[in-house]
Image (tube, rainbow, N blue to C red):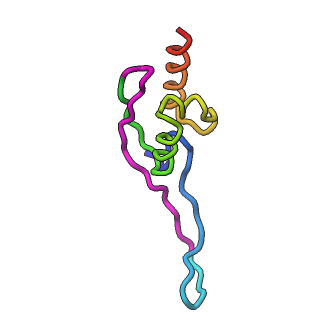
Amino acid sequence: MARRCELTGKGVMTGNKVSHALNRTRRRFLPNLLNVSLLSDVLGRTVKLRICANALRTVEHRGGLDAFLLKADDAELSPVALAMKKEVRAALAA
């Protein structure tokens, strides 16, 4: 399982651990991933996703999963989220 957020695409970053003596060694910055169940109002069901805490806050800020998906860029979304976005668009059109 990749360490990547399914909604925002945020992944692992690399950098340096810097000691007090300014010695530098490589390290990894891992995203804060959470397994959550989000409710889709349009589809009327819950969806389990692995997203970062920042994405969870953004979903709440935008007014729910459906609003987030409709506004999100397709390049950032995972295949599961892209399929859900298609379902939401189809449900809203009908």
- Residue 13 appears left or right of 50: right
Say if 39 sits above or below 59 in the image.
Answer: above
Residue located 60% across and 39% down the image: 76
Residue located 51% across and 24% down the image: 83
Residue stretch rendered in magenta on the structure: 26-44
| Total marks in image | 0
Whether residue 42 appears in magenta in the rendering, the answer is: yes
Residue located 54% across and 85% down the image: 19
Whole-percent x, y for residue 38 in the image: 39, 35
Of residue 3 and residue 73, the one placed in the foreground of this image is 73
Quadrant containing the N terminus in the rendered view: top left
Say if 16 sits above or below 13 in the image.
Answer: below
Of residue 21 and residue 37, the one placed in the foreground of this image is 37
Of residue 4 and residue 59, the one placed in the foreground of this image is 59
Whether residue 30 appears in magenta in the rendering, the answer is: yes
The secondary structure that most of the magenta stretch takes on is: strand
Say if 74 sits above or below 8 in the image.
Answer: above
Of residue 59 and residue 2, the one placed in the foreground of this image is 59
Residue located 59% across and 85% down the image: 23
Whole-percent x, y for residue 56 in the image: 46, 45
Whole-percent x, y for residue 64 in the image: 47, 34
